[in-house]
Image (cartoon, coloured by chain):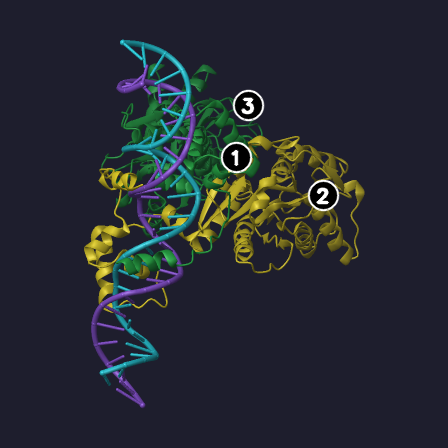
Chain colours: A yellow, B green, C purple, D cyan
Amino acid sequence: MANSTQAASERKPTVPVHRGVTMADVAKHAGVSRTAVSFVLSNRENASISEETRTRILEAVQALGYRPNAGARALASQRSDWYGIVTEIVTAPFAVDIIKGAQDQAWLDRRFLLIAPSDQADATGLNQGMEDAAVEKLLEQRVEGLLYAATYHRAVHVPESANEVPTVLINCFDADGKLPSIVPDERAGGRVAIERLLQAGHSRIGVINLDPDIPAAVGRLAGCREALAEAGLELDPALVVSGHATADGGYEAACEILDKYPSGAGRPTALFCLNDRMAMGAYDAIKERGLAIPQDIAVIGFDNQELIAAYLRPKLTTVALPFEEMGALGVQTLASLTAGQPITAHQQMVDCPLLERYSV
Amino acid sequence: MANSTQAASERKPTVPVHRGVTMADVAKHAGVSRTAVSFVLSNRENASISEETRTRILEAVQALGYRPNAGARALASQRSDWYGIVTEIVTAPFAVDIIKGAQDQAWLDRRFLLIAPSDQADATGLNQGMEDAAVEKLLEQRVEGLLYAATYHRAVHVPESANEVPTVLINCFDADGKLPSIVPDERAGGRVAIERLLQAGHSRIGVINLDPDIPAAVGRLAGCREALAEAGLELDPALVVSGHATADGGYEAACEILDKYPSGAGRPTALFCLNDRMAMGAYDAIKERGLAIPQDIAVIGFDNQELIAAYLRPKLTTVALPFEEMGALGVQTLASLTAGQPITAHQQMVDCPLLERYSV
DNA sequence: CCCTCGAAGTAACGCGCGTTAGTAGTAGCA
DNA sequence: TGCTACTACTAACGCGCGTTACTTCGAGGG
């Protein structure tokens, strides 16, 4: 027993591989204890440190260029100040905006957002292997909460292990409805689009629809019908055409609608395209027929895909999906959750604002 | 002396706030020492652990759902396995692709990429306050290396503190030339675009130029001239028009070029647009004049901005900026650097591949 | 039989920090 | 003088882990 103790104390100390200035260095430099440094740097309320010592410590910090070690702090304090977000990062440009919103909000809250990629979605849902690994990696970093974002509004299946920390879904929802989620208010978006067209004097409106089953289409179309109903109008089924969610799909759908009225009589004076890519195709169809936007036919889009909407000629009036807001709200919700505070609603809906440009 | 020791040992132990299974738990469950667990989990070469103990330990890991604590590991091993990347995340869609490339490569190397936002660039360069803070935050996380990415090819000024760890610049370079950088090979990109047009039989080629002073314009135009020279041709100054790097700018520039030849005689049969947004505007100008793409006028772009190039009608043939490759190469370079290995070149150039679509 | 040597493990230290339970010193008051 | 109260600190522990320097035990050799 004594032997081993002695051996231990005789052992030559491991050579310290100093990669940075530590609190101990600061303490030595300032001639105080490490504890004092810790107290000053963490701005402890009821720690009594004289003003003089305090400044001496802060000067030492400056002089040595001390930089706290976030990992060590996390280990000691048992909180990491990290959130994690899982998303398909490059699939759609939308994910970026969600991340941006979340990132900025996290930054404001002095927290760090760890971004983990989950590979592209395929027909069967997300690439589950990659996703699980991503969540796992984030949990290894001891994130305090998880954000789970989809690039288009849909139901998702979240990896089991996400249940170990507070989790918030962004732009998606889980089928079981167990996790809190944040989604765009598609219905209100549909309303505002139609209301804008009504206000501009249009009463005969064509709709270029997405796949009718996806949440976006359901909501937007419902809002559309509501707004028309309030104006005493109805959606003419002949004017609703579904297509692929691409420019080509939009082109074809627009052709179909326009060519129903070769003489021009009965032709809609406005087109509500359920996304901007389709609006892009619709532009071509309209122009090809020698019609002018918005004089002959007004066009309104959805999604506000900047690169399209802002560069089409004329620039496209469209309804924006509030990605940044959803990202920010996600972080705020997570903050409430991790603080043990109640959240306002299990499913929070965020407004889709109308962006006026020149196509109406 | 004895007193204080006694007091310390009499002190009631702090209540452990257990937030997770630790190695100690695994060790207890498997009936071995914590060291043994560590050896097994880190796959130590020359540690002699019997196969039987080994499996017992792994079973315990499974049974308890043990998950290593990355922060503690980093603290003990003095290496974080983290890289940091500083970039303006949302300003341009390009940053995303760089991040994606870097992210994927880092993931392969079992490293984590911390993404720190730096606010938007303004005329005077990047928002320095935000940037310094971003770098500072990353260093606090003890990243082992830094990536610094710009959304368009240019000279940048990197925060001082970035010098404390290996740093690689992506899609930019520092004026002093001190830091290794990775940039697109603009010149080769210019060449390949022109070569494609020559091959299609065009010899009279118009160029819609960017601001002539930026690196992208300089390089691309040089490549363009080279390719023409090799074919015994020259760039007609009358056919080179600069404009704003927008669709409107491209539209105006294209109008200017086309309207110089109202009769059609002498008019270029192809347009090389130095970015896709300008190509988008050029499309409008061409179509307005009743000309067909590519039959009457071929168009080739640059940047491969998916949302534009893939949705224009006809789809735009363009030269791609290799953002993902640059991001990946950045991480690889960083890996070499942190491993103390030499890197192939101080400034690495990455090829800009031609993407054939239907506008040539 | 003793000695050496490798296999199989373990005790203990330190990474940088937050935190708790102390101590030393002084002022105030009865 | 003795006691409390307060200010201004500090010693020591533990967070979860990697790592080094041991120990123990059985097999093999002389």
Q: Position of residue B331 (x, y in %)?
A: 38, 31
Q: Residue at x 55, y 58 (%)?
A: A340
Label 1 vs label 2: CA separation? 57 Å
Q: Which residue is mark 3?
A: B358
Q: Amino acid at mark 2?
A: Val
Disc number placed over residue B291 in the picture, else none: none
Point out residue B192 in the picture as x, y percentages from the top left corner. Answer: 41, 20
Whether callout 2 and callout 3 share a subunit is answered no
Q: Give residue B271's quadrant in the image.
A: top left
Q: Which mark identifies residue A207?
A: 2
Density class for disc 1 (Cα within 10 Å; few <14, some 14-19, many ≥20) is: many
Q: Is residue B283 visible?
A: no
Q: Is residue D10 above or below residue A304?
A: below
Question: How many numbered discs, if any?
Answer: 3
- Say which of marks 1 and 2 sits in front: 1
Q: Chain of mark 1?
A: B
Disc 1 to disc 3, C-alpha distance: 56 Å
- Numbered label attached to residue B61: 1
Give, as a three-letter code, the residue at label 3.
Tyr
